[in-house]
Amino acid sequence: MLFHTPEFLTLMIVSLALFYALPRWRIPMLTIANMVFYVVAGVGNLVLFLAMTAFTYYCSKGMRGPYSRFFLWFSIAVNVANLLFFKYTTFLLRSAENWLGIDLLTDNSFLLKIVLPIGISFYTFQMIAYLVDVYKKRWEPAQSVFHFWVFISFFAHLVAGPIMRGHEFMPQIDALRSIRFNAANFRLGAFFFALGVFKKVVLADYLTPYVDSFFARIDTLSGAEGWIAAYLFAFQIFFDFSAYSEMALGIAYFFGLELAVNFRTPYLSRNPTEFWRRWHITLSNWIKDYIYIPLGGSRKGEVRQYVNLFVAMTISGIWHGASWTFVAWGMFYGALATLHKMYIVLKEKLGLGFLDKSRIYQAVAIFVFFHITCIAWVLFRAEGLRNALSLIKRMLTPEAFHFAGLRTYLAIVLLLFALHVAEYLLHKYRSHLAAWWHRWFPAPVRAILYTAVVAVLVLFLKGEQNTFIYFQF
Amino acid sequence: MKAVKYAIIYLIAVQFLLPYAFKLSDVYHNRMDYTLMLNNNNFHDIDAVLEQVKHDIARRKLNDYVIMLGDSVFYGSPGNSDQPVSVFLQQKPGAPVIYNLAFPAMQLGDFYTMLLKLERWGISTDKLMFNIRYASFIPREPGPRSVFWLAEDLRKLDPQAYAHVLPQLKSAGFETPGNPYESFQRALHEDWLPHASLMRYKDYFRQKLHRLYLAARGRPVPDDALDDSRAWYIKKQWQESQGIDYGRFLRDPQLVASFTDKPFDLSESNWDVYFLNKILDRQAGKQTWVVLTGTNHDLMKAEVEKPGYAANLQAIDRMMAGRSVTYVNLEGVIDGDYFTDHTHLTPEGYAKMADVLWPYLKQQ
């Protein structure tokens, strides 16, 4: 169920009304609401999700006994196997067919009919994080299987994150009954929700047909067209994914809950390390805490650090999808992160550390890194590694930077980047702006803008709804 | 939170005032906008047209106007919105205002539903003109749906007729809710949201913005012709010069079926006769013109010369005789040179049709 649809809004309003009217029934109410939200994706998917949730919960309880290590590895193995089966079976078998030159799948094989349960990548990672935290005694097992279900399946973040940790979200679930209606939370919720809907309905969905039409003819794109396609996709995927995350944040605030921020204007990053602190923040924190650090992080020497970084980013790419382009994308960022580490060391050795304070250097770094990101997005978006590499090759020729006939698109891209900068300023000065807004504009005047925002969002809603890009992961 | 209360009041005001921010010309230009509705997959846009027609009638204090219903022929396909027969009729001296609410692919079931919608909107159908064709009465095997676009409206406005026709609709691919969530979705999208003005006008609002953008850039509004409206023999010559087999179009199974010479069943078990009777029952005591728009006798010579075809036409004539309508049979009346295909006319052809129909309209 998409957040920006009348169906979801109706269910959310009903849930909110019951939430505040019946505080003692919040856990049961959210238990059912989450099930209703998820069952739309299919009863089978819901049964699987419930089964995995119950299994993980009871394994976490088992970790307080003598076989804690067994329960940890067993539960992680089952969760990973569940994800592998639904997400990677066909990909692995097809790859093996190509390598070995034999047929492993027949045309009517049931394995070809496997449908990826929605949100499986997100809830699997959330469960693994929870299991590790409970094992390491960073957190105690949830009070009840229902508390755990609400923690894992809260409908705002279930389908595409943010990936919440036990210490972040479980205390809020445990204290659900004591939540009182708070006007400030409601305003914040409305702000984030409206921002998300605006990004999705007015920006992302209108970019989609242009991006699709460019990538549909990837073979024939010139280098300049490749850059335009990459720029537009960069903003399409950002608006699309950050829109979902912001709507999730807004919905949570309506319920008096706080989810983790997942995006901080990532295209203002100067290097890959910074990018992954600004893009899909909860995923990169998860990769750092549960892959990179357990592999040794930076504690086992420089070379090992680079290897760990490369492996962690590759896994991040694989998580995104069952395709070699995603693997390549992850490896690309792994290589970038490694090179960046080396670059920092080199810069310090050459005494060029002062450059980091230079605004010109920072602007150039943002410009250069944004273009590197766009190259990575070609890997992410293109159908097939060969197509992606071929287009990247064309994008790196000198002729690729002649945008004749594409000036309108270039102007749109510049406008979108300006919006990105505006978003940065909006978040940076949000509380000042809010105070100024409430101080200088009386309620009837503020209401005009709120009404206009609602009207614009409804008027720009398309008949056919585009789903969110990250739902496919 | 005070601002929220004001916002609710403003939204209620928008609900009632938004329709007055639009004019008839924003939603209707001699006919409804088929491309807009198709591209947005939103046939509730028709409600905005009906609302503006109602406002137009009230604003101009009209007592004498004609409502035109029909399929693609009365819509003026494939020409643009300045070329339907209604435009040429309104150019005749003393002609009444004609609101052309025809729409491509509408069946008699849709005409009946439109009649109910017009009544719901308080628009008089004291003068109603609609077209039928030979193809209107061919057996449905199983499609097309006898209520092609407006089945959900029929469900709300005449549940009995809807229940009666539902098996035929389902056999032709119409889907009904299969679980509670789908029922909820249908109620939301078909029963509740169409009442919201913002939802009713959103497609026209975006179109208006787009046209303002075009005007600001000095670009004309694109022509809204649906296809090439030149005479059929000119198109045939051009296609053949390009190596395209024009006969392929004539061998299309749907086209062939629409000229079947098997005897028509014109009892009420024929869905079109069922809905035709419902229309005429509702129009009792009112002025109704039923126009059987003809066929291109040059292009479809082999079909129209079959004895079965002529017999079926006579059966339709007999069915319409004795009804309290003005029945105009245009079969073979308009020369083949005025057609752009087997059934649609060139702009000159629609002007010719207007010349033929005007005496019937003028009489009343």
Image (spheres, rainbow, N blue to C red):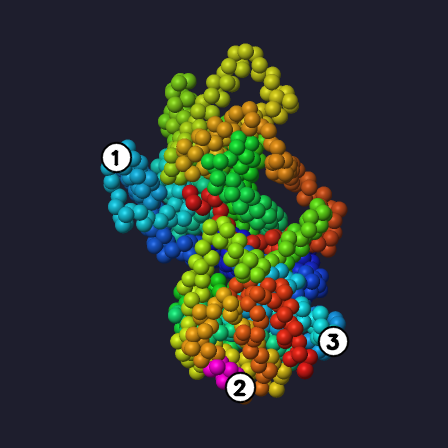
Of label 3 and label 2, which has the lower sequence position? 3
Quadrant holding the C terminus of chain B? bottom right
Asked if residue A70 lies in the magenta stretch, the reply is no
Residue A324 visible in the displayed image: yes
Amino acid type, mark 1: Gly
Q: Where is residue A164 in the image (x, y as percent from the top left)?
A: 46, 41
Residue A79 visible in the displayed image: no
Pinpoint the chain carrying mark 1: A
The residue depicted at 27 percent of the width and 37 percent of the height is A97
Q: Position of residue B2 (x, y in %)?
A: 68, 56
Q: Which structural element holds mark 3?
A: loop
Q: Mark 2 points at which residue?
A: B321
Query: What is the quadrant of residue A82 in the picture?
Result: top left
Q: Crowding at label 1, few (<14), some or many (≥20) Cα neighbours within 10 Å? A: few
The residue depicted at 58 percent of the width and 54 percent of the height is A461
Q: Principal SS element in the magenta part?
A: helix
Report if the CB atoms under discs 3 and 2 are less than 8 Å apart.
Answer: no
Which range is magenta?
B314-320
Q: Are marks 3 and 1 on the same chain?
A: no
- Identify the mark at residue A101; answer none if there is no mark: 1
Q: Name the residue under label 3.
A: B94
